[in-house]
Image (spheres, rainbow, N blue to C red):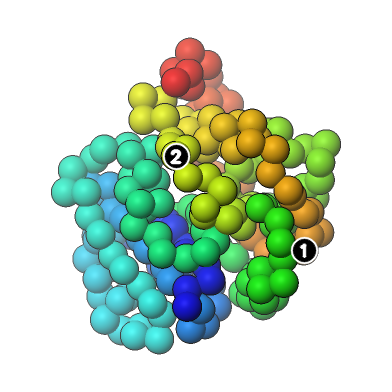
C-alpha cells in the first residue's frame, strides 16, 4: 500500500534534485515521482542514473520531452500519483529525514485532509505554520494533502509563477480539516538567487504575470 506520493517537478536542477532525493526516508509505503520539464543540463541523465543506483527507493522518472512549465508538470505528477496522500518536494529543497518520516507515521491515524509542517530556511530560522498564516504560506511544499480531497483541482497552466498559491486557494474553498503539526520537516532553500520568487522580489517578474 502506498501511503504517500512524493512529487517533484524539475527543470535544470542536476545537483539539487539529487540532494532532495537523498533526504527522502527509505520506506516501503512511499513512492517518489519526478518529472523532468525539458531540462537542458544533465538533470534527466542524473535522475535515471540515481534510479538505477538506488533500487531501495520507489522512484519513477518521467520526462515531458519539452518545457511545458511547472504547472503542467505538477498536473501530470498528480495524475500519476497512487498514494492516499501526496506532498510536493520541490527540486531545490530537501526534507529533514527523521522528522518527515515521523509525520508519515502520523498519517496512519490522522483523519483530516491536510497535515502541515514547519520549515527551516537557509539562515537557520524556522517558519512556523499556523492558521493565521495558512492563506499565503508555502502551499503544497509544507503540507501532506489527502489526494481524494483535491479531486478535480488543477494547477493553472498560464501563470509564470505562484501556481501553487492558486492551487492552494482552490483547496481552501473546500474547507479542509487541517492540523498544524509544529514539526520542522521541510528545508526550504530560501532565498535562492534565480528562483521565480527571487525574480519577483527583484521586480523582474510583474504581478500581472502571476495571474491565472
Q: Residue at x 36, y 72 (%)?
A: 59
- Give the number of the mark in front: 2 or 1: 2
Percent across and percent down for residue 50 are 32, 75
Callout 1: 10 Å neighbours few (<14), some, many (20+)?
Answer: some
Q: Residue at x 47, y 45 (%)?
A: 151
Q: Is residue 196 above or below residue 32?
A: above
Q: Which residue is mark 1?
A: 183
Look at the image and tell me in which quarter the C terminus lies. top left
The part of the image, by quadrant, that contains residue 136 is top right
User: Considering only order in the chain, which callout, 1 or 2, is on the residue closer to the N terminus?
Assistant: 2
Q: Residue at x 59, y 65 (%)?
A: 95
Q: Is residue 134 left or right of residue 200?
A: right
- Using the numbered discs, state the Cα–Cα distance from disc 2 to disc 1 in whole angstroms: 29 Å
Percent across and percent down for residue 49 are 25, 75
Residue 152: assigned label: 2
Percent across and percent down for residue 173 are 64, 31
Amino acid at each position: 500500500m502506498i501511503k504517500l506520493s512524493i512529487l517533484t517537478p524539475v527543470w535544470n536542477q542536476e545537483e539539487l534534485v539529487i540532494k532532495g532525493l537523498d533526504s527522502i526516508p527509505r520506506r516501503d509505503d512511499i513512492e517518489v515521482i519526478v518529472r523532468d520539464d525539458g531540462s537542458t543540463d544533465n538533470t534527466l541523465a542524473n535522475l535515471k542514473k540515481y534510479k538505477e543506483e538506488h533500487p531501495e527507493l520507489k522512484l519513477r522518472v518521467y520526462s515531458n520531452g519539452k518545457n511545458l512549465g511547472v504547472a503542467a508538470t505538477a498536473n501530470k505528477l498528480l495524475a500519476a500519483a497512487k498514494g492516499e496522500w501526496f506532498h510536493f518536494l520541490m527540486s531545490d529543497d530537501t526534507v529533514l529525514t527523521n522528522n518527515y518520516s515521523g509525520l508519515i507515521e502520523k498519517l496512519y491515524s490522522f483523519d483530516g485532509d491536510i497535515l502541515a509542517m514547519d520549515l527551516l530556511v537557509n539562515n537557520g530560522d524556522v517558519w512556523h505554520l499556523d492558521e493565521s498564516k495558512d492563506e499565503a504560506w508555502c502551499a503544497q511544499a509544507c503540507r501532506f494533502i489527502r489526494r481524494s480531497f483535491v479531486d478535480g483541482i488543477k494547477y493553472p497552466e498560464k501563470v509564470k509563477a505562484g501556481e501553487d498559491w492558486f492551487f492552494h486557494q482552490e483547496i481552501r474553498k473546500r474547507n479542509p480539516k487541517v492540523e498544524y503539526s509544529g514539526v520542522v520537516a521541510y528545508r526550504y532553500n530560501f532565498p535562492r538567487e534565480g528562483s521565480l520568487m527571487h525574480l519577483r522580489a527583484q521586480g523582474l517578474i510583474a504581478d500581472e504575470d502571476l495571474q491565472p
